[in-house]
Structure formats: C-alpha cells, structure tokens
Image (cartoon, rainbow, N blue to C red):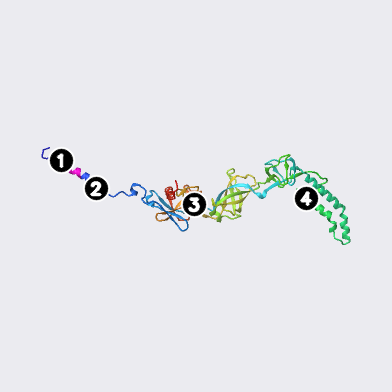
Amino acid sequence: MSATKKPYVSALLGLVIAWLALSLLSGCDGPAPSPAATGSPPSELPTLVHQPGGQEWMTVDLSQIADLSISSVQEVSLPGILEAVGQVTFDDRLVSTMISRVSGRLEDIRVSQWDTVRAGENILSIYSPDFMTAEAEYLEATSSASQSGGAGTQADAFGMSAGSFSMKANLKAAAVKKLELLGLSPADILAIKEATPSRWMRAPISGIVVTKLALRGAQVNAGDQLFALATLQRVWITADIYEDDLSRVHTGQSLEAITAAYPGDTFKGVVDRISPALDPNTHTLQLRCQVENPGEELKPQMLARVRIVTRPGAALVVPQAALVFDGNAYYAFVLTGANMVERRSVQIATWNDQGYARIVSGLKSGERIITRKSLQLNALWREVHGESS
C-alpha cells in the first residue's frame, strides 16, 4: 500500500468506530420492553372490591397471566337411569328383640349367634320367683272363681246385679293379665297345674339370631336385652343421592340393585322412603330402598349399586382444572367483569367424563370461569388477604 493511501484508511476506520459508539449510546435511551414481552409481573397489584352483599371481587390484569383460559359452566343431559351407591341393612320391621320380663337367672340356652330359629321355638329357660308368684295367684283366683260360680246365677234369678259377685272373676282376669305380661301365651296359662319358678322363652319370629347377649347362669333384670332375631327375606338398601336429583325420585319407583359379590344377580325393589333431612356438607340425602332378597344373598353392611328408572335430568359440569382445593373446600374463580374475578365456594361430585367434575352447588349454567391458571389466581387471592400460601 502506498504512503498516500494509509492516512485515508485510518480516517475511515475512525469514522466506523465512532458510528458504532453512537449507536450503542442511543440504544440505551430507547423505550423499555413491555412486561408481557419480558414475562415480568404486572405493574398494578391486585386489589379487593367489596360488594354490598358481602361478596369480595378481585381486580387483576388477566392479560398479564400467561396461558390463562376462560370457559363456561356447561349443562349436560342426564340419562333416564339414576345410579347411587348404598349399603344393605336389616328391615327393622322384620327385627324382633327378646328382653327379660322378670328378674332371675338364665338356666339353659339352646341357640347361639347366627343360628336360624322358627317362631315358637324354645330359646332359653329363666328361673324367677316372679313366675311362681304369678302362677300361684292365678291358681288361687281360678279355684275361687269356680267355687263362686253359682252365686252369680242365683243373683241373676232374683234380678240383682252380678257386679257384687264378680270380684273373684276380676281377680282371675287380673291374674291372667299378669301372666300375659310376663310372656306366657294363652295356651301356657291354660296348661298351668302348679306354680313353678322356671319358664321357657320362645322365638317371637322365624329368623336368624343376629345378636346374643345371654349367657348361661347369668343374672338378669327385667328389661335386659337377651337376643335379637331378624329375617333377610326383605332388606333395606340406604343410598345417597344429590340434591339436584331429588325431583327425579319419588316413593314407589321401581329399582334394581347389583353387588360386587353377586354381579350376575339382579335384586328387585322399590323406593320406600326419602329422608326429610339434607346433609349440608355434601348436599345429599338418603333413600331407603326396600329390596326383595329371596335367596338371602344380600347381607347387612354389604355395598350395592342401585339403579332407579326415572325421567332424564340435567347436571352442571366444569373442567377439573378450574377447581382449587384450599382449606378443605373447593373453589372456582368466576369472571364477574373486565379483569375482575370472584372466588366462589362450590360443592362437587364425580362425573363420568374424565377431566370433568359435576357441580352440585355454587355455580350457574353459562357463568364464565377461569379454567387454567386458577392456582395462580388463588395465590394472588391469598396474597391480597394477607394469607400465607
């Protein structure tokens, strides 16, 4: 390179370096990138707005929350069959409790728990002086009434009232009544020939011994429970239904019950009673279903699925991602205005479609809810309330 060109090249390089320096300095004074472009949190903090009815709404710039989505509460059709899970119990109208009517001692016991007995079968023998006293009074009253039987006939012949001569008959009636209260049948009373302190208690119904509290040789008092007998020819299934299904159910509706133990067997029954009380925590109430059990396959405490034929209904469903579980309750964030949300408590139930939940209470059809990023909104909600996450 010639000597005349060297100063020219040096000057050109100096201009380029100066231009680059000016460009860098001017870039430092340019506009700052937006928070959305950099991913930084919004400049305005969420605030609470108190409503006249006591509700609290939170204002928040939803555009600053990435990947947030909004959907509506959907109303879907329910099929014409209502299903519920229940538990088998005894029909208490077919349960009989045997109690001691006297104070005494258990001499003999012929049955044990889960034995099957027939009505009228001897169950246990009780020794009690109460029996001997009542039988002696009956024998004396019977003997006196028979001896004075002619007095009433003579009084009637003279037109006199027989009331004055019926004291012995009243004593006999009182003695009979006392024996009946002690558990003796009319046949037992007629068979009394002498006073004895021991008597057999008989099974009041045919069934199964489900409770046995009696022990041979034990001392008992009047009113003590000894046995409980029940039959399984007909049982109850107590099932829970949700509040919004109540209008689809009424007493007398036919139903079918199936169990895991006997999946191939179907048990027929009807809705017998509907509970008047609603569980405020789960928004459910109980049905008492009367189910025929001819083979006695259904056992108490067994779980059963009940299918009730009813008219179609409707249910509200939301994506499970829209729900937040906080403090033993579920919440959903409802869009109440532009950049304004309400955290609302909801009651939920399981739903057939995976990823969705059934709303029992707390939301209405068509309401717009935050589907994604509900956990982030819940953290902001707790923050403005001064709660720790």
Q: Secondary structure at mark 1?
A: helix
Which residue is depicted at the point 18% across and 44% down?
Answer: 15
Q: Which mark is residue 26?
A: 2
Q: Which mark is residue 346?
A: 3
Alpha carbons under labels 4 and 2: distance apart: 116 Å
* Rendered location of residue 135, percent (x, y): 80, 47
**In contact (CB < 8 Å): disc 4 and disc 1:** no
Q: Tell me which amino acid carries mark 2.
A: Ser
Q: Tell me which amino acid carries mark 4.
A: Lys
Between 192 and 315, which is closer to the camera in this rendering? 192
Alpha carbons under labels 3 and 2: distance apart: 56 Å
- Dot 4 corresponds to which residue? 178
Q: Which badge, 3 or 2, is on the more N-terminal residue?
A: 2
* Rendered location of residue 240, percent (x, y): 57, 50
- The quarter of the picture where residue 368 lies is bottom left
**In contact (CB < 8 Å): disc 2 and disc 1:** no
Q: Secondary structure at mark 4?
A: helix
